[in-house]
Structures are given as structure tokens and as C-alpha cells.
Image: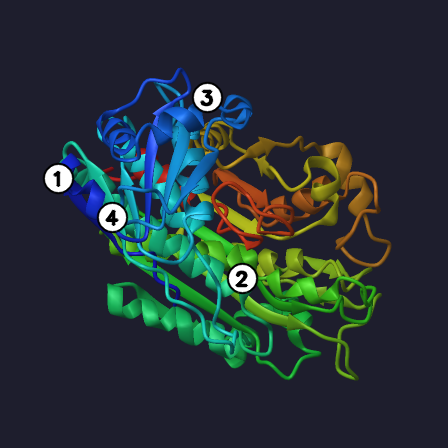
Amino acid sequence: MTDPVAITYAPFDAAILAGVEGRLVVPVEAEGRLNAAARKVDQLTRKGVTRLMATKGWEKAKVGEVAWIGFPAGLACEAVGVVKVPRKPSVAEAREIGAAIAKAGGTGPLTVAAPGFPLAEELVMALTLRAYEFTDHKTAPREPRGPLSLMVDDPDAVRQRLQPFDAVASGVFFTRDLVNEPANVLTTTEFARRLEGLRDLGVEVEVLEEDELERLGMRLLLAVGQGSDSPSKVVVMRWNGGGEENPFALVGKGVVFDTGGISMKPAAGMEDMTMDMGGAGVVAGVMRTLALRKARANVVGLVGLVENMPSGNATRPGDVVRSMKGDTVEIINTDAEGRLVLADVLWYAQERFQPTGIINLATLTGAIIVALGHEIAGVFSNDDALAEALAAAARAEGEGAWRMPMGEAYDAKLKSRVADMMNVGGRDGGSITAAQFLRRFIKDGTPWCHIDIAGVASVKSDTTLAPKGATGWGVMALNRLIADRYEGK
């Protein structure tokens, strides 16, 4: 697993700045006021910082941008980075600054001298997340990232505030690694094996194999995977950190590769379908985070692991399959497979655990990307209180989420001539009809949210906190939701 960069914390000492090696970064307020670190560097470089601030480039620079002074006289470091900061940064601005430092800091030793900087923990959090690199399949030798040092007024206080974040970063990186893995590596069996590793953290892990899934009646899930040589599985992860209350449930779609089945996808872009297990990846990352920080809540995470492949044994368009619930589904399009996986796992989660609430995550529809792009996940819910709590947690963590409409009128599009329902309802309102399909597998009185993360799980360009590829979207928001709403109850 990719480990977050190690950070050392030290009290600010102007006397040692001259001997710092590697790269040194100092914040400078947009108004031009220098903190103690910037003043010392300015003195040692014979007004190098002051001269830089007089340039048009600095004047045009945005908050968070870093300007470099290469091989500065009077300092041992190879470069000094001067980062533009507001006098009173918001959480979002502090994170942008940390991310900018991570992108500009290179791989050698990096020291950030930030005495007096408020929200230093947010800066470090963003720096840590943005420094992620997935290099498991690179063969060329890579220079390891050098040590990272943070010099602040009260390092113990910053370290204490960051302690819970260490678990969050580990969970985010776990999710990113899973989503970034190619499908020939992350098979259903390998995915389950990695989740079994959570036992070392105190998570109870149970792997349900195909014979047990057949006995339970999870025929929708099995129908998705029956064309593949990789066995379908359901993995149940339980974190029992609370009292005697029923758990909150997280359910994730884990399609390790999606060809579309008999309803084959176009070849162009199909390589991206290694990320179709993104929902399961988020659930795994949240469970890791909860275990690492010893969350005082009962949470169960369930993921359906399948591969959707065409073969002589694959499910055909027009097949009718009975769900674990007992409803029959006419499978019109085998590329609308994620909702079939989720339907059985959602029903199983409710039957077995009677959860206090349930959230499922899935890279479910291209329609949500058309609606919201790659910035915001779509949220569908039957419960205003849970939806609002989720939205608040996502806002607090800077993870965009937008509640989408639902309504009985959309159900008409799912009517089947030969079965209880079809698995698709046409192109218009595609993400909504998918949510309406899932809602049929939620029991009355169970608070539920469905999050369509098709646009945010993996992206083609850098985001503030992640390089292109897997983002780990949702780990931070769901961890906060559980902390704010369920812990200690």
C-alpha cells in the first residue's frame, strides 16, 4: 500500500534556516507582510524575497502559487519557494496552499517554515494528500520522496490536531491504490484478500463465496459475474466501536472490470473501467480509517465484487432474474450491471444487520457526469435528515455533493412487460431512474442515500488534493459523517 509521506514537526528557529538542505518554503502574505521566516530568508539572501515581491509575476500570482529563488546566496538549500498566502486563510485556501507546495516541492528534502500561519494542520493535510503517487507498476528507478519538515510556533499542538487525520490519509490512500490498480492485478479474489488484511486493524471480515451467495438468493449479483472466470464475492467488514446499537451500513459497487457484458461498451475508453469498483474502494477506505482511529461507532461495510465479461455463459439482454428480495428483473442492458449488484447487497445488509441507516456508493451512470461533470457527486435519498448530514460533511471536507431529485413518476420508465421491473429506463433521466431502481430494494423506514460517484472517483486531470487518476472521493466526507452523527450514540 502507498504510505503517506512522513512529516517531522519542529519549533521555528530562524537560526537554522541558513543550513536547511533541499528546498525551503516560506509563506508571504499577499499584502506583502513578512513573517519571521520570510524576514530571515530575506536578510540572508540580501533582500531576495523583497525583490521577488516587486516583480509583475508576484503581483499577478494567485493565492497558493509558489515562486522560486534558485540556489540562493546565503542559504544551503537548492531553492527557496515563496508562497503567496492571505492574511487570514480559509480552510479551502489553506488546503490550496498545501497542495501547491506538494506539487512544487519536488522529491528531495522539503522544509516548510510557517511560524504564525493559521490552519497549519490544513496545509499539512493537503500537502500529504497531494503528494500521493501510484508507482507500483513503474519499473524505472524513482527517486524516493525526501523527508518533509514543518517548522511552526507550537509543533505539539499542530501534531495533536493532525492525529486523527493520519487515519484519514491512510484510508484515502488505500482507496486510491485500489481504484488505480489494473484489473489483471485487482481481481475479485485479490480485492477480497486485501480487504481481509483489515483484520490486522480489528475489523471483522467475512468473505461470502458463490455457493453461499446462491444459497442466499443473490441471483442478480451472480448474473452480472457469471460470464467471467473470476468468482463473484461479497465481503462483509464490521467495525464494532460503539455500544449495543445496530450498525450504520455502507455498501459499495465493486465491479473490478466492466466490459458491458453482452451489451458491449465501445473500445475507446474501456481501459478506464478498471475504476468501476470505485464505490467498493471508498467503503474499504472508510473502514480502514474508522479502524485506525478507533471510531466509537458500529459500522458495517459490504461490497459486491464481480467482473462483467461477455462469454457463452454471460447474462443476455432479455433474461429475467429473481433478486434476493424476490422481485424479478428483466435485464434489458447488461451494461447497467452495478444496480443489480447493489440491489442484492442492499437487501442482504438490511435483512442481516437492520442498520440504523444505509449509504451506497457506485460509479453507476454516465448520466450523472452529463449532469454534474467531474466536480460533484450526485446524491439521491429517501431521508432529508441523512441527506442534509451527508451534504454538511461533504462541504466541511471540500468534497462536492449535490442532491438530485427522485419521484414516483420515474418508476413508470422501469415497467416491464414480462417481469416486475426492467433494469434501465431509457436515456433521459438515467441517473434518476437508476436511483429509483435501487430504492425498490430499501425497506420502508430505513434512511438511505445513494451516491453516484461516476464523475469523481477517477479523473483525467489533477484536482486540488489529488493527481490525475483515483481521487479517494468520499472517504473524508463519510468519516466525518460517522464522527458527527453516529459516534458515541
Of the pair 363 and 38, the residue shown nearer to us: 38
Instruction: Name which of mark 3 and mark 1 comes first in the sequence.
Output: 3
| Residue drawn at (76%, 73%) of the image | 315
Say what secondary structure mark 4 lies in.
Answer: strand
Q: Is residue 337 above or below residue 172?
A: below
Q: Which of pointers 2 and 3 indicates the residue nearer the eye?
A: 3
Q: CA distance from mark 2 to mark 3?
A: 45 Å
Q: Identify the residue under disc 4.
A: 149
Three-letter code for the amino acid on which mark 2 is drawn: Val
Q: CA distance from mark 1 to mark 2?
A: 35 Å
Instruction: Name which of mark 4 and mark 3 comes first in the sequence.
Output: 3
Q: Which of pointers 4 and 2 indicates the residue nearer the eye?
A: 4
Of the pair 167 and 342, the residue shown nearer to us: 167
Of the pair 170 and 214, the residue shown nearer to us: 170
Q: Which of pointers 1 and 2 indicates the residue nearer the eye?
A: 1
Residue extending farthest to the right is 417
Say what secondary structure mark 2 lies in.
Answer: helix
| Residue drawn at (60%, 81%) of the image | 230
Q: Identify the residue under disc 2.
A: 179
Three-letter code for the amino acid on which mark 1 is drawn: Asp
Q: Which of pointers 3 and 1 indicates the residue nearer the eye?
A: 3
Query: Which numbered circle lies on residue 156?
Result: 1
* Tag 4 near tag 1, CB within 8 Å: no
